[in-house]
């Protein structure tokens, strides 16, 4: 708990972006005759947004990849690797 809005509110928004997908899917399941082209388009937009948002959040925030504030832009700031017993890099 940091008390700061970022990243906590953005992370909450990631989970909240799944709610339209869940509600529209449930509506389509229980009321198939009312599920029209408009709801289908809304479902596609919602699922696309949620997928991209979740993917980018996981890559950047959870895995620490693709960050511009690190020495290795495509890698996380702290690199872990194996070395042999003599201390030489493999």
Image: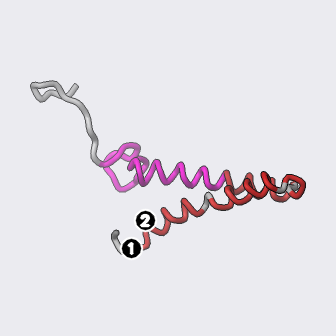
Q: Does residue 58 appear left or right of residue 73 in this picture?
A: right
The way the protein has been coloured in the rendering is secondary structure
Q: Residue furthest front?
A: 30
Q: Is residue 90 magenta?
A: no
Q: Is residue 73 magenta?
A: yes
Label annotation for residue 85: none
Is disc 2 in contact with disc 1, using a CB cutoff of under 8 Å? yes
- Which residue does the image show at 36% across and 74% down from the upper left? 3
Q: Nearer the viewer, residue 17 or 69?
A: 17
Residue 52 lies, in percent from the top left, at: 59, 51
Residue 33 lies, in percent from the top left, at: 90, 54
**Relative to residue 5, is residue 26 depicted above or below?**
above
- Which residue does the image show at 38% across and 50% down from the upper left? 64
Instruction: Report which residue position mark 1 lands on.
Output: 4
The part of the image, by quadrant, that contains residue 72 is top left
Residue 58 lies, in percent from the top left, at: 47, 50
- Which residue does the image show at 48% across and 69% down from the upper left? 9
**Relative to residue 80, is residue 44 depicted above or below?**
below
Q: Does residue 68 appear left or right of residue 57 in this picture?
A: left
Instruction: Report which residue position mark 2 lands on.
Output: 7
- Give the residues drawn in magenta, as a range: 48-77
**What distance separates the C-alpha of mark 2 from that of mark 1?**
7 Å
Which element is circle 1 on?
loop
Q: Nearer the viewer, residue 27 or 63?
A: 27
Q: Residue furthest left?
A: 86
Which element is circle 2 on?
helix
Q: Quadrant of the C terminus?
A: top left
């Amino acid at each position: 708990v940091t008390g700061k809005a970022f990243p906590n509110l953005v992370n909450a928004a990631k989970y909240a972006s799944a709610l339209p997908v869940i509600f529209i899917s449930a509506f389509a399941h229980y009321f198939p005759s009312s599920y029209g082209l408009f709801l289908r388009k809304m479902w596609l937009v919602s699922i696309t947004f949620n997928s991209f948002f979740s993917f980018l959040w996981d890559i950047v925030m959870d895995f620490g990849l693709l960050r511009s504030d690190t020495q290795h832009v495509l890698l996380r700031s702290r690199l872990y690797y194996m070395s042999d017993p003599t201390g030489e890099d493999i």
